[in-house]
Amino acid sequence: MNCAELLQKMERERQELHELAGRYGFQHPSVISKSVQLDQTLNEFQWHKTERKPTV
């Protein structure tokens, strides 16, 4: 997955997280699960960004 696709995925997951939190509250298992999923996507995005930087 490239950076642009990861950005789209992060935005989609962020919106889903906000919807779930609004519906169920922050401690609900589905909200926590979505938060973990978003964290993993953010980590993957960060990894892609740092791997592409040229070394000096």
Image (cartoon, grey):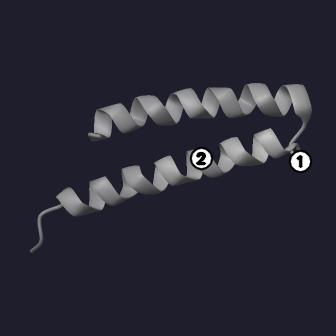
Q: Which quarter of the rendered picture does the C terminus lie within? A: bottom left
Which labelled disc corresponds to residue 27? 1
Mark 1: which secondary structure? loop
Residue count near mark 1 (Cα–Cα under 10 Å), binned few <14, some 14–19, many ≥20: few
Q: CA distance from mark 2 to mark 1?
A: 15 Å
Amino acid type of the residue tagged 1 in the rendering: Gln
* In-image side of 6 versus 13 (left or right): left
Q: Where residue 36 sits: x, y (%)?
A: 64, 52
The residue singled out by tag 2 in the image is: 37
Please state if 21 lies on the left or on the right of 18 as rendered: right
Residue at 12% x, 71% y: name it.
55
Q: Is residue 20 above or below residue 53?
A: above
Under mark 2, the amino acid is: Gln
* As drawn, 46 above or below 6: below
Q: Secondary structure at mark 2?
A: helix
Furthest residue in direction bottom, as rendered:
56
The front one of 29 and 14 is 29
* Residue 21 falls in image quadrant: top right
Q: In the displayed structure, does residue 54 sit left or right of residue 11?
A: left
Q: Residue at x 78, y 39 (%)?
A: 30
**Local crowd size for mark 2, using a 10 Å CA cut-off: few (<14), some (14–19), many (≥20):** some
**Horizontal and vertical percent position of residue 23:** 87, 25
Location of residue 4 (image quadrant): top left
Is 46 on the left-hand or right-hand side of 13? left
Q: Earlier in the sequence, mark 2 or mark 1?
A: 1
Tell me the tag on residue 15. none
Q: Residue at x 48, y 47 (%)?
A: 41
| Quadrant of res 46 | bottom left
Q: Quadrant of the N terminus?
A: top left
Residue 34: % across, % down: 68, 41
